[in-house]
Image: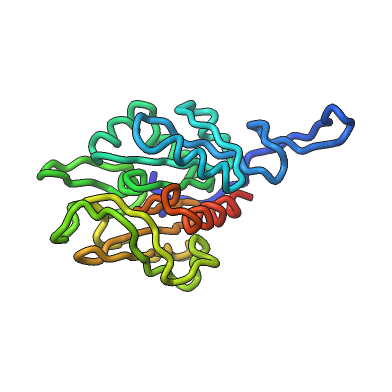
Amino acid sequence: MSWYAVGRITPAQAVTGADGRGMTVRVDVLGSLEGVPNVVVLDYGSGNLRSAQRALQRAGAQVEVTSDRDAALAADGLVVPGVGAFAACMAGLREVRGDKIIDDRLSGGRPVLGICVGMQVLFERGVEHGEETSGCGQWPGTVDRLSAPVLPHMGWNTVRAPEQSRMFAGLDTDTRFYFVHSYAARSWTLEDTPPFLPPLVTYAEHGAEFVAAVENGPLWATQFHPEKSGDAGAALLTNWLDTLA
């Protein structure tokens, strides 16, 4: 089931207990302290797992790298990283039922952040070397090869974010993020569907325009690597963690 066709439900329950000093503390279902978001980085054999973990920890999260379904569903936020080929990433996701984990979280309004190929697999399909692979289908559209004289697109680039973006809140328009990819979604085809809020789509250019980031309710994604983007990436991850209430 795609996110753009589902509604929202309440967050996971929390329990209350006392610490060793007799102070009452609030602990969520994964054991994190109140005010410290618990994030799972999904381990499906792809992505800069430890880089993502360290970046999220620096941004203030308690982070676990795992493929455990229960942990991934219970976490305040789920990060889906990804590097390499679309088909290989989808194979790895399906092996740990990651596509179902993503769908189940979004069906309950639980935040998910896709990074690089972890963003690409959220679309309906990917085409590499003439071969088509089905994606998670959270968004319509196709990921294919960029139209640019030099590939991969590797290095720092600016993006064009909507004014109302929460993802890029507090960041200047000339802020640069780190990209390394040869494929992307080159257009956005999801129509606005009231009563749902319209997705906020951020673009970048390398040879031609492509989708650099999306904010779609609890589903956020970036084609660039926030964990490799220095202070700008740290600010973006902090903005995402702030949504995990």
User: Dividing the picture into quarters, in which one does residue 45 lie?
Assistant: top left
Image coordinates for residue 240, horizontal then vertical, percent: 53, 53
The structure's colour scheme is: rainbow
Q: Is residue 244 left or right of residue 159?
A: right
Q: Residue furthest right?
A: 22
In the image, residue 210 sits, relative to residue 127, either above or below, namely: below
Point 25% across, 66% down: residue: 209
- Residue at 65% across / 32% down in the picture? 29
Q: Name the residue rendered at 38%, 64% in the picture.
A: 201
Q: Which image quarter: residue 157?
A: bottom left
Give how far across and how far down residue 24 sits, in percent. Answer: 84, 36
Q: Is residue 103 visible?
A: no
- Front in this rendered view, residue 16 or 228: 228
124, 31: nearer the viewer: 31
**Residue 244 pos. (x, y %):** 59, 49
Q: Is residue 115 above or below residue 46?
A: below
Residue 134 appears in view: yes
Please tell me how many numbered marks the rendered image carries. 0
Instruction: Please identify the quadrant where the N terminus is shown.
Output: top left
